[in-house]
Image (cartoon, grey):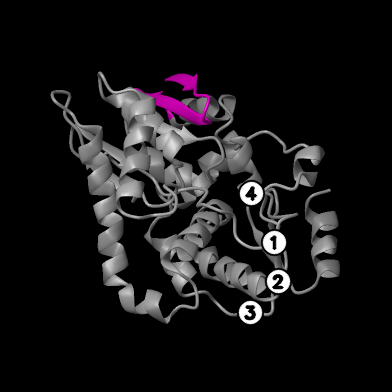
Amino acid sequence: MQTQTAESGIRKIEITYGMTVQEVAEQLRKEGVISSVWGFRFHLRRQGMDRFIQAGTFYIPADVSVSEVSEMITRPEGQHGEVRIYPGFTIEQIAEIFSSRISGTDRERFLEAIHREAESRGYPFAEGFFFPGDYRITQDQISADRIVHEAFDRFEAWKQTHRQDIAASPYTAEEIVITASMIQREAGSAEEMPMIAGIIWRRLELDMPLGIDATTRYELDNWSSPILWEDLQRMTPYNTRRSPGLPPTGISNPGIQALHAALHPESSPYLYYLHDPSGTIHYAETYTEHRNHIERYLR
């Protein structure tokens, strides 16, 4: 296995035939993708995934959960010549992945194609509308515009399918996309998404700051290192600790489950949540209860 750390926070992981689970786990930990070799191996065994690790090249963001890493390296990449874009990737990361897989295509060209497509469709921003999934590529006469157009068409197809739900929502399609992009980055699993969606919408209704640090990470393009205290004090549109309301754009490109959660949030009395080091989520109704969770699980 060879690894390369990209500026955008993506680790390029190459798994070769014959590597043991232990070897794969140790390299993932070395590159900062996972924190515990034992915990990762235990998760693979418990899910029955340890015998299905795939050989190949994988592009893994540094901030994904153990379950997401497990799915990425055990799920076949599809047919030869396909690139798989996972939910939660940013357009910067997507552009880097495609430019590394397609000869003659650079990252800036791909980003320009994404922004151009968003503008042509009348979207107020580009981040959030590149639909995750498998995309067929060829090395001869490849067109960034073709891939980007297909990705946005897939989003439009989803939007058309759910047009009645979107029309019934008190929020616009763009606000739903922004919220889904935060849910995608905040949730540790698909099961948590509807509850987190409900908390986000409830805080907005109460005119409370969202307090989602993933929005600041997006602004800083820092998905793995600790956020500095002074960064959280700056009054910027993406600092949802300080600025009320939604950030001005999406912060990732959400998948179907996050979009569904944003459309169908789960009602609850909760206003706060946090994940402990094991990845377990803890909800709280009051700030005092939330502070107690911080002291108990994060100190």
Which quarter of the figure has residue 275?
A: bottom right
- The outermost residue toward the left is 140
Q: Please, what is the three-letter code of the amino acid marked with disc 3?
A: Ser
Residue type at mark 1: give it: Pro
* Residue 128 or residue 75, whichever sits in front: 128
- Is the residue under label 1 in contact with that under label 2 (CB below 8 Å)? yes
Q: Amino acid at mark 4?
A: Tyr
Which numbered disc flags the more N-terminal residue, 1 or 3? Answer: 1
Is residue 51 among the parts visible in the rendering? Answer: no
Mark seen at residue 238: 4
Residue 57 position, x and y percent, is 34, 27
Name which residue lies at 52% across and 52% down.
Answer: 249
* Magenta stretch holds residue 44: no
Question: Dot 1 corresponds to which residue?
Answer: 244
Q: Residue at x 27, y 70 (%)?
A: 161
Give the magenta range: 1-20
Mark toward the start of the polypeptide (1 vs 4): 4
Residue drawn 36% across the image and 36% down it: 53
Q: Left or right: 222 with respect to 42?
A: right
Q: Would you place residue 297 above or below residue 143 in this image?
A: below
